[in-house]
Amino acid sequence: MRTEPSAKSGERRIAAARRLFSLLGDSLDLDLAVRLWDGSRVPLGRDVTSPYEIVVSDLSILSSLLRRPTPENLLLHYANGELAIEGGDPLGFVAAAGSGVARKRLRQLPKIAAIGAALRVAAASPRHASARSAFRGAGNDEGFIRFHYDIGNDFYALFLGEQMQYSCAYFHDWDNDLDQAQHDKLEAICQKLQLQPGDRFLDVGCGWGGLLCHAVERYGVRGHGVTLSQEQFDYAQEKIRSAGLEGRATVELCEYGEIEGSYDKISSLEMIEHIGLDDYPRYFRKMRSLLRDRGLLLNQSTTRRAKPARRRWRSPRLGSRLIERFVFPGFELDNVGHTVEAMEAARFEVGQVVSWRDHYARTTELWCSRLWERRLEAEAIVGAEKARLWLAYLTGVSIAFREGGLRVYQIVATKHASKGPSGLPALASRGEP
């Protein structure tokens, strides 16, 4: 049996790869290019002006992508550095790729010619991607939190801003920087809760203690925060000490079901995503038990759009499965209607439901840009693979908020234990953000 010399076989496969990408470019007409392992560059459009390039490091990687054309395989080759994006930040790349338009144009691809080129490339031995950073811990809240939050405060400090706020900022002006927008978010929450000197204030899922300390310093409340993250707990303890707030602010490392006491106001910012839909009744009953009569609860959560069939809506999407495996295990997103229903079932009176989706799109865009600018520091802290996975995660959620696949809502409610006025603040009654 006569075998083809390896050098000639390699040349033919490079030619086939160029041919395949050339055909894709004729159909897609994108403002970017592909650079192959031999250094050759193939434009993916007729008039490419952007600096963005998709860099394929080896024939075996392209063979893997053709044999196993799954989003997970693509993501992991990117995370492993075998498939790179050069020329700028990920959000700019997505804009140049124009994914929505590209899918429609792909129907124009000459299939027979493309299949022939693809088969020649795929004949090479593939090197499929693997992940060292996938979640393999205990399948409980403590394990989930440790995987996502305890990767290091230094990592989060690269992109969250001076207040270490890992939740949606609020922009009075879209040109405001992240720190100003996060300050304005803290102010908006304190005002919605009508915090007064001496109020007993609870922040459930307090993170690094930004809202807790802000409320104590500026509004004179007695504040208590809880978290399941050891890294966050240590940071918040030090923040309280360095700000001279001992005795007025405390933080506890515990699960929400273990919280004791009575409070006038409670905030819960994007913590409920960790709870799970089946545990909503228990969660909201617990929040109600911690509030005095006419006490206020502000619940902020990331949500999905409701579907006509509830069973279909609860089925996790591909993007959610990838996020859960590599970045944010154990999360489950609700729709806002069901959240309101669960709160009312727990005998809360809901006074205000406000969407901050555009604000979260801008927040995550700034997070992504800041992490991109400091990506080398991120790689030094958590490793190159995890840093790239986080860049992909922040890029994806930023696009999802911008396009409406993800939403975020603030709900202000009051515990209504007896008849009479609701006790809701005037801000909630007017529906102000």
Image (spheres, rainbow, N blue to C red):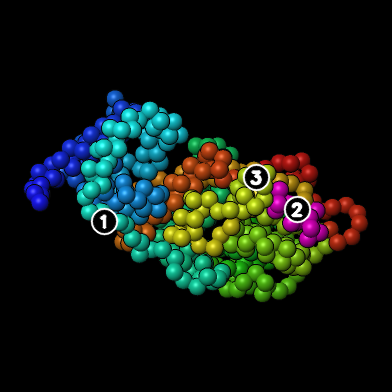
- What residue is rendered at 46% in x and 46% in y? 396
Q: Is residue 347 magenta?
A: yes
Amino acid type at image mark 2: Glu
Please tell me which of labels 2 and 3 falls first in the chain. 3
Q: Is residue 264 visible?
A: yes
Which residue was labeled with disc 1?
127
Does residue 191 appear to the left or right of 348 in the view shown? left
Circle on res. 341 = 2
- What residue is rendered at 39% in x and 49% in y? 70
Magenta-drawn segment: 336-349
Real-space CA distance between mark 1 and mark 2, rounded to the nearest whole angstrom: 49 Å
Q: Is residue 339 magenta?
A: yes
Mark 2 vs mark 3, foreground winner is 3
Between 19 and 157, the one lying in front of the other is: 19
Real-space CA distance between mark 3 and mark 1, rounded to the nearest whole angstrom: 39 Å
Residue 52 is situated, as x and y percent measured from the top left of the image, at 30, 37
Please tell me which of labels 3 and 1 falls first in the chain. 1
Residue 179 is situated, as x and y percent measured from the top left of the image, at 50, 49
